[in-house]
Image (cartoon, grey):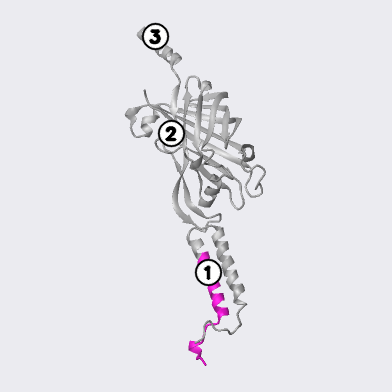
Amino acid sequence: MTTPASAPFPLRRLARVLGLVVLLGTGGFWAAKGAHPGWSQNRVPHPQVDEITGIEYVTYEDRFVPGVEVLAAGLGLAAGLFAVSFLFNRNQPARTQ
Amino acid sequence: MKRHLLLALALATSLTAAPLSFDFKDPKGVNAIQFHLDSLLEPISGTASGVIGTVAFDPANPAATAGKITVATKSLVVSNATMTEHLQSPMWLDVAANPEIVFELTSLANVATTGNTTSATASGKFSLKGVTKEISVPVKLTHLAGAYGKRLNKPELGGDLLVIRGEFTINRGDYGIQPGKNEDKVNPEVKLILAIVGGAPKA
């Protein structure tokens, strides 16, 4: 018999909370890194103009910018965790003592 | 009398002047070919910066311009590392077997010069992935006299610059790049934008 304060966390709820953490974490990471609406970038292009010739050219900065596939992967993982949560009984404990 | 002699000398010199040879291995590393093609989600854009070559250009006779520009295939990059790997792989450009993309200028037509800028249609042999085709490309050539040293912060060097700009479209299938494949994901038309500068140091 456990007391309410030390009641085991049901696996169903744990999976859902983890899914929410993954969803918010991925979304937050994607937004914080610039909310790039395209594919991920490993190098970020910076347009430049050569002063004398007026030629427009591109330099690259080595920096990772997550794209929508990162967001989709996070969403997929969160959805997976949510789906998995249904495999557990409503009151199944995460661990037994 | 002396003025007439000097004028005649200058005229004779200009008439007999050899075309200037411009080296397109840019010491400032600005030269690149930009490419764009439509794709799922967003256009694929990238650059090829390994540009070398020489162009012989005579400001008094731009129609006689000739030369060859070579681009190192392995210098083609896009922002996404995986896409760059695919682009350079045997399925697409096969960088190992085709290390160079070449445009050899054979003639200029429809030449019109205004100030230091010449507009023309450049015809020549374009080689990509082992396939060579005759193509015609609208180009603009801008001759910047005396700007070579100035651009390198060494005005005492003198010399000239030649800027070549052009924009054209090729069909990747014509050059054996996934012909007829993945056209729903990657557009068969590839837009190429050329903006390069060559230098001719003062002899």
Q: Which residue is mark 3?
A: B4
For the N terminus of chain B, which image quadrant? top left
Reading the image, the residue beneath label 2 is B25
Which mark identifies residue A22?
A: 1
Badge nearest the viewer, 1 or 3: 1
Q: Is residue B80 visible?
A: no
The subunit letter for the residue under badge 2 reads B
Residue B181 vertical placement versus B175 (above, below): below
Which secondary structure dominates the residues rendered in magenta? Answer: helix
Residue A45: percent from the left, percent from the top?
A: 48, 48
Which residue does the image show at 57% across and 33% down from the upper left? Answer: B127
Q: Callout 3: 10 Å neighbours few (<14), some, many (20+)? A: few
Image height check: is B78 above or below A81? above
Label 3 marks a residue whose chain is B
Give the residue at the far bottom of this rendering. A1
Q: Which of A82 and B127 lies nearest the eye of the viewer?
A: B127
Do circles 1 and 2 both sit on a common chain?
Answer: no
Based on the picture, tell me whether residue B28 belongs to the magenta stretch.
no
Q: Amino acid at mark 3?
A: His
Q: CA distance from mark 3 to mark 2?
A: 41 Å
At mark 2, the secondary structure is: loop
Q: Is residue B166 above or below residue A31?
A: above
Range shown magenta: A1-27
- The residue shown at (56%, 59%) is A69
Residue sitting at x 61%, y 41% = B177
* Label 1, residues with CA under 10 Å away: few <14, some 14-19, many ≥20: many
